[in-house]
Image: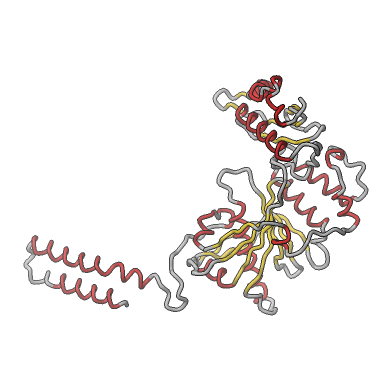
């Protein structure tokens, strides 16, 4: 026991021991209780500070409740001193230049003009590329909004780039055990790459259409769970000890738009998570978001920028105007795609050469669907297209 706490306990005992001979005097009892409370209160800060420090590890014993991986937020990252740092460019993140030579299937996929291919893929030669193209197109269907399509696309892309070669395999809907705060819970990465011995090599998560969803913290929770499982696996199979420091790569998919992460895992961080203790060190996570991708969320891989002559800044400004106008009019999710093709959605219309997909919202008060064409009229009125509001952007209406 800390000296301050011991002294306070003695003072409290001395103050309360006088109660025996007081003869149950109410005033005397109140005085004795007050003196005992004061003695304990004086000792509380030092006693709490002593109890909050581990003499064995020197870690501050601030606790955090056990939380499943799918419920991690910035709160858990802040508690465990995990900092996400965005890298400036490709080479700074990957430590190498972009590749220029690819195998035949990858080269065909990279040269594929998906605006021409969709909705039919008859012109695609490789069956594997055709499979990837179908999965990618499925993600961009506005009316579907199916999260499983993102998982399928992520898996087929990893397989296209040979992440399932040799002893590796690509799995979806995995369940990993996560030890946190002396309890066991689960982490559920959407896609993972693992070896035949089941050790996890790479993780993929996605942005869900749910309020309060935090994809990056949840990807990091998945990485911590993967590290813990890899350590346990080596111990169970009597394999060489798993490295005390390991970089676990991860990807977060926002529709077809990827963001890349390198999570610098350590045994020390894993132990802190297991015990629910706040570490005194910092864990770094590198982030790389490819630049110059379109504003649209789901169709990042479909946009080949038909309007090559128009500056990207003007295209972006035009997109923002259309998206803002449509959302103000419809109060629903909208997607804007550059191209001459038609979208397979409940409603699509062309504004300034952009195909705009609209999912009419349900008015719960009247249990009826908002008139879609009224929305379009409001959008056109807002943009004032006929009066040439967008002429300053260099767009011919």
Q: Is residue 346 above or below residue 133?
A: above
Picture coordinates of residue 79, whole percent (x, y): 49, 61
Q: Residue 359 is drawn in which quadrant?
A: top right
Q: Is residue 359 above or below residue 85?
A: above
Query: Colour scheme of this structure image?
Result: secondary structure
- Residue at image coords 83%, 38%: 115
Taking depth in this image into account, of 376 and 314 the one nearest to the observer is 314
Picture coordinates of residue 183, whole percent (x, y): 52, 65
Q: Looking at the image, can residue 187 be seen? A: no
Taking depth in this image into account, of 62 and 99 the one nearest to the observer is 99
Left or right, residue 349 beside residue 268: right
How many marks on residues?
Answer: 0
Left or right, residue 151 beside residue 120: left
Where does the C terminus fall, quadrant-wise?
Answer: top right
- Residue at image coords 45%, 75%: 58
Where does the N terminus fall, quadrant-wise?
Answer: bottom left
Left or right, residue 365 beside residue 91: left
- Residue at image coords 55%, 64%: 184
Q: Residue 56 is drawn in which quadrant?
A: bottom left
Q: Is residue 176 above or below residue 308?
A: below
Taking depth in this image into account, of 36 and 81 the one nearest to the observer is 81
Taking depth in this image into account, of 35 and 179 the one nearest to the observer is 35
Q: Looking at the image, can residue 222 be seen? A: yes
Picture coordinates of residue 43, whole percent (x, y): 26, 70
Q: Residue 261 is drawn in which quadrant?
A: bottom right
Picture coordinates of residue 335, whole percent (x, y): 70, 36
């Amino acid at each position: 026991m800390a000296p301050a706490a011991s002294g306070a306990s003695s003072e409290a005992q001395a103050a309360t021991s006088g109660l025996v001979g007081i003869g149950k005097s109410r005033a005397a009892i109140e005085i004795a209780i007050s003196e005992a409370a004061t003695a304990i209160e004086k000792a509380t800060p030092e006693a709490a500070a002593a109890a909050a420090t581990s003499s064995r590890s020197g870690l501050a014993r601030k606790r955090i409740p056990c939380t499943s991986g799918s419920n991690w937020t910035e709160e858990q990252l802040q508690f465990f001193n995990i900092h996400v740092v965005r890298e400036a460019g490709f080479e700074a993140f990957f430590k190498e230049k972009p590749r220029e030579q690819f195998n035949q299937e990858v080269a065909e996929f990279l040269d594929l003009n998906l605006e021409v291919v969709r909705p039919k893929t008859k012109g695609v030669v490789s069956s594997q590329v055709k499979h990837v193209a179908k999965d990618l197109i499925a993600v961009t269907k506005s009316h579907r909004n199916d999260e499983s399509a993102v998982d399928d696309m992520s898996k087929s892309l990893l397989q296209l780039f040979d992440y399932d070669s040799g002893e590796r395999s690509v799995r979806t809907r995995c369940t990993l055990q996560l030890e946190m705060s002396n309890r066991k819970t689960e982490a559920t990465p959407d896609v993972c790459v693992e070896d035949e011995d089941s050790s996890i090599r790479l993780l993929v998560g996605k942005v869900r259409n749910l309020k309060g969803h935090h994809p990056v913290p949840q990807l990091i929770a998945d990485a911590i769970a993967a590290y813990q499982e890899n350590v346990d696996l080596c111990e169970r199979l009597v394999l060489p000890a798993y490295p005390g420091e390991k970089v676990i790569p991860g990807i977060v998919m926002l529709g077809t738009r990827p963001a890349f992460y390198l999570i610098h895992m350590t045994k020390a961080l894993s132990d802190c998570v297991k015990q629910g203790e706040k570490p005194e060190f910092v864990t770094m996570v590198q982030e790389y978001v490819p630049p110059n991708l379109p504003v649209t969320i789901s169709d990042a891989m479909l946009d080949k920028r038909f309007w090559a002559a128009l500056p990207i800044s003007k295209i972006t400004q035009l997109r923002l105007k259309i998206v803002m106008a449509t959302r103000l009019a419809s109060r629903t999710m909208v997607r804007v795609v550059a191209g001459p093709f038609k979208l397979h959605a409940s409603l699509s219309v062309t504004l300034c050469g952009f195909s705009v997909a609209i999912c009419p919202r349900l008015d719960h008060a009247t249990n009826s669907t908002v008139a879609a064409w009224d929305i379009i009229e409001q959008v056109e009125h807002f943009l004032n297209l006929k009066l040439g509001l967008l002429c300053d952007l260099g767009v011919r209406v």
